[in-house]
Image (spheres, rainbow, N blue to C red):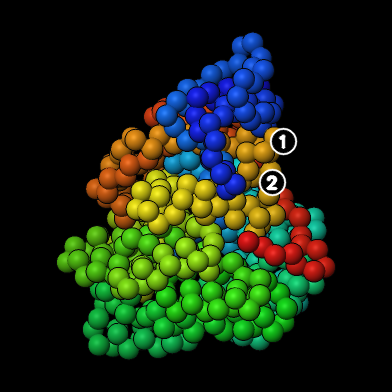
Amino acid sequence: MAATWIAGGTVVTEEGRRRADLLVRDGVVAAVGLSLDVPAGAARIDAGGCLVMPGGIDPHTHMQLPTMGTVVADDFASGTAAAAAGGTTTILDFVGPERGQSPVEALDTWRGWASRSTIDYGFHMTVSWWGPGFSAEMARLVQAHGVTSFKFFLAYKGGLMLSDEEIVKGFLRCRELGALPQVHAENGELIAHLQAKLLAEGRTGPVAHALSRPPELEGEATLRAVTMAETVGVPLYVVHVSAAQAARAIGEARSRGVKIVGETLPGFLAIDDSVYASPDFDQAAGHVMSPPYRPKGHLEALWRALESGALSTTGTDHCCFTREQKRAGLERFTLIPNGCGGVEDRLHVLWQLGVNGGRITPEKFVSLTSGNAARAFHLWPRKGSLAVGSDADVLVLDPTREKTLSARTQHQRTDFSVWEGRTVKGVVVHTLSRGRHIWADGDLRAEPGWGRFLPRRPFGPVYERLV
C-alpha cells in the first residue's frame, strides 16, 4: 500500500490539539508532526483548515440482524459503507443465537455475513438463553475466538429476558473468564404488564410503545444490574442509557469505585418523546426503539452525565428498518420492529450538539466517539489513537462545512431518518481505514471485504479500570 500524507491540518486527540501533518504507511500511523520525511509518490490529502482525528468506533450496531419476523435493512456491506461516510472506521456488532443454539455456531454465521464489511469489526455475544451448554461455550468464545463481551437482557419477557438468577450466574462466568458483561436494562416484567394493559384499553399506536416503557423501569433495572455486578465483583457496561434515573445509578456507582461504563446515543441527547404523538404512523413508528425516546428533562440529565463522566461512550444501536417494515405494527404497537438508524450520522450530530453547542471540547469528542470505547473493549491503542504504530483509522473533519441530514441523501439502506432536515456544521470530508482512503469528500470508495475481524483479549485476573 502506498504511503499517504495528510497535510496542513490540526491533529486532535484526547490529549490535545496541535498543528501537525500525519504520515500513513503500511496501514499504520508512521509519523505525526511538522516537516515530515514524506516518501516520493505518497498520496497527499489536503487537510488545510480541517481537524484530523482517530476514526470513530461504534460499539453498538446490529447489521443483518434477523428480528421480529424480518431482517434489518442494512447488511454488513451497506451498513459499514454508511459508517465510513460518517467517519466511523470500526464497529462492534452483536451475535444473536437462536434460543438453544450454540453461540459458537451463531458466531460462525455472523463471521460469514461480516466478511463483506468495508471497515474493521468485532463482536459481542448476546446471551439469548442460559444453561450449562452456553456457559461452557463462553470459554471457547473468549479464549479461541476473541469475543470477550456478553450482553444480558433484563427486558423482552418470553424472548431474550433472563431471570436474575441466570444473570448472576452469567456475571460470575464472565468474571471467571475475564469477560465484560453488558446489560440492556429495562424491567421486562413490568413492561409486559403495561403492554397488556394498554392493549386491553385499545391503545394500539406507537405512543403506547413509550407509555409501556417508562423511564422508571430503566432506572430500576439499571440499579438492579449495577447491584448484581457490584456484589459479585465484575465490571459492567450498560448499553443505550436513555433515562435520568439510569444515568444517576451509573454515576453513583462510579463514585463508589465500581468499574462501570455507561453508553448513550446521540438521539437520546436531542430527540424527545413528542415524536410518538405524531398522527403520521410512519413518522411515529420510525422512532420506535427500546428504550424509547424520553421526555425533555432526560435529555439535559444525559448531557450532564456525559460532562461529568458518568456516561463515557456513545454508540448508535444502529438497527434500521424501512417504513414498510415498520408497518407490520400498524394495528398493534408491540409488532413494530424496534430500532432506528444512525451509524452514518453519529459523529456529525455529536459534533453539532456537543462541540458547536459548547457542551464538550474536541478532545472530549474524541474520547466519546473512539478512545473510551477502544479502552473498554480492549482495542486500545490499536484503535482510537493516532500514536505511531496505531492502525491508520483516520477522519478529517471540516468544521466550517454544513450539510442537511436526510433519508434521501444518506447511505444507510432505509427510507427514514430520525434526523430528517437537521443541519449540522462540521462534516467528515475524508475517512481512512487502515490507511485505505474509503471516503473522499463525497466519493464513497468503501469496498466489501476490506474490513478485518478484531479478536480481543480478555481482562486479567483483576479487572483494570475501564474508562
Q: Secondary structure at mark 1?
A: loop
Residue 381 is marked as 2
- Residue 389 is tagged as 1
| Earlier residue among tags 1 and 2 | 2
Looking at numbered disc 1 in the image, what kind of residue is underneath it? Gly
Q: From the viewer's side, name the closer residue of 170 and 461.
A: 461
| Image: 357 above or below 332 | above
Query: Residue 81 location, x and y as percent?
Result: 48, 39
The residue depicted at 73 percent of the width and 71 percent of the height is: 174
Task: Work out whether 212 lies above or below 437.
Answer: below
The C terminus sits in image quarter: bottom right
x, y percent for residue 89:
55, 41
* On-image quarter of the N terminus: top right
Whether residue 361 is visible here, answered yes or no, is yes
Tag 1 near tag 2, CB within 8 Å: yes
Image position of 209 with respect to 338: above or below: below
